[in-house]
Amino acid sequence: MDFIRGKIKNIQEEIRGIRRELHKIPEIGFQEVKTSTYIRNLLDAWQVPYEIVATTGIAVHFKGAAPQSYAFRADMDGLPTQEATGVDFASVHPGRMHACGHDGHMSIALGIIRYIKNERPTLTRGLLVLFQPAEEGPGGAWPIIETGILKKYQVTEIFGYHLYPDVEKGFFATRRGPMMAGTGELDIEITGRSAHGGQPHQGKDAVLLGARLVGDLQSIVSRSIDPLEPAVVTLGRFSAGEARSIIAEKALLQGTVRTFSETVYKQIKGRVQQLARGLEEEGVRVEVTFRDMYPALINHNRLVEDLSAALGERMIELSAPVMLAEDFAYYTRELPGIFVFLGVKEPREVRHEPLHSARFDFDESVLGTGVEGYVRYLEYQGVLHE
């Protein structure tokens, strides 16, 4: 058996047990108190020093021969979802679930720590393992950066995983350059004038004008944006009215904007404002609110090439980026980084349960695969020597 794989197999059951304990206690962003306590108790038992960062986050640093460090990030938070997996280690927190695999990410990070603690390899550079709160919202990456922890340990590059149901188990997938979209949230409130349903001419119908705006917004990407620039405007909510016989006074549209270009993002925002002002010519008031969320996640080309060399045929280079968003993008905006999808799809499976599904689960053997992948990457980089 391969030396590294054999060493990781020795801790596979422990990692699986850790994942199940974490899966039971999902907590939403910056409320990961039990999660943080569980991890700190493990680290104490393993006699691994750590620091508290960004409220509930944890940083573990292994000193290397050189002052510079590599970093590995794992997100901690769950989702406001009622679990429906039926597993015997299901969430004990009503309305909360690890439906996006963050329990797996933390378990991989703890597996990396356990491996280094057990095997005591020579490190030519330091290794900083970060447990980051609030990836799902409001975003914990920037608060981590603001603590100065990356500068304290002279981090020169950062690595992150995400379990991914569209990639086959045992494989790793990433790409050079743009990996995941930047995103913003959009709220549009239309205020018209209510009237009796039998006398619509006396009102200003927020439903009718809101429906018109929905169609106009969907034309932005197809008619106002360069077709070679990926962009998506999604409206996920349209609510209006109080009764079937009353012309609605108010309507609320909520959605997201996703793109890989800051220029395109600004173009979309400007076009939304133009459409809103045009609608106001109908005698209604339109209020538009944008909340800029995460920037686009851009992988460093050299790191992708290094990972491919380290993993060989198990590494898949994606042909196109995905329109999902990730606050790992804040790290890659500050320093070279690489974000990698770790496959969980079974070889003969037509469709794995998607991320954020109340039934999302995975074969826990992928946790060892994740530990192995990062150890091999560090070994290839010359950071880790057995």
Image (cartoon, rainbow, N blue to C red):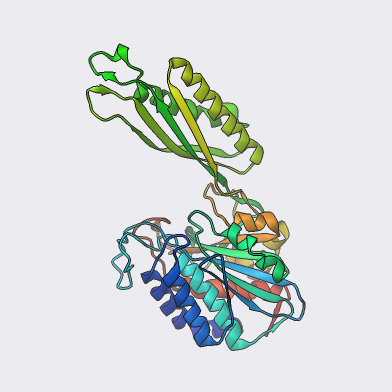
User: Looking at the figure, which quarter contains the N terminus?
Assistant: bottom right
**Which residue sits at x=50%, y=84%?**
11
- Residue 17: horizontal and vertical position, in percent? 41, 79
Camera-side residue: 153 or 11?
A: 153
**Which residue sits at x=38%, y=61%?**
360
Camera-side residue: 236 or 173?
A: 236
- Residue 52: horizontal and vertical position, in percent? 56, 72
Note whether 63 is above or below 350 in the view shown.
below
Question: Does the rendering let one see residue 222?
Answer: no
User: Looking at the figure, which quarter contains the C terminus?
Assistant: bottom right
- Residue 111: horizontal and vertical position, in percent? 53, 78
Query: Total label count?
Result: 0
Q: Is residue 114 left or right of residue 176?
A: left
**Which residue sits at x=64%, y=61%?**
145
Note whether 160 is above or below 253 in the view shown.
below
Question: Does the rendering let one see residue 202?
Answer: yes
> In which quadrant of the rendered view does residue 370 lie?
bottom right
Camera-side residue: 272 or 119?
A: 272
- Residue 151: horizontal and vertical position, in percent? 71, 66
Q: Is residue 291 left or right of residue 379?
A: left
> In which quadrant of the rendered view does residue 48 lie?
bottom right
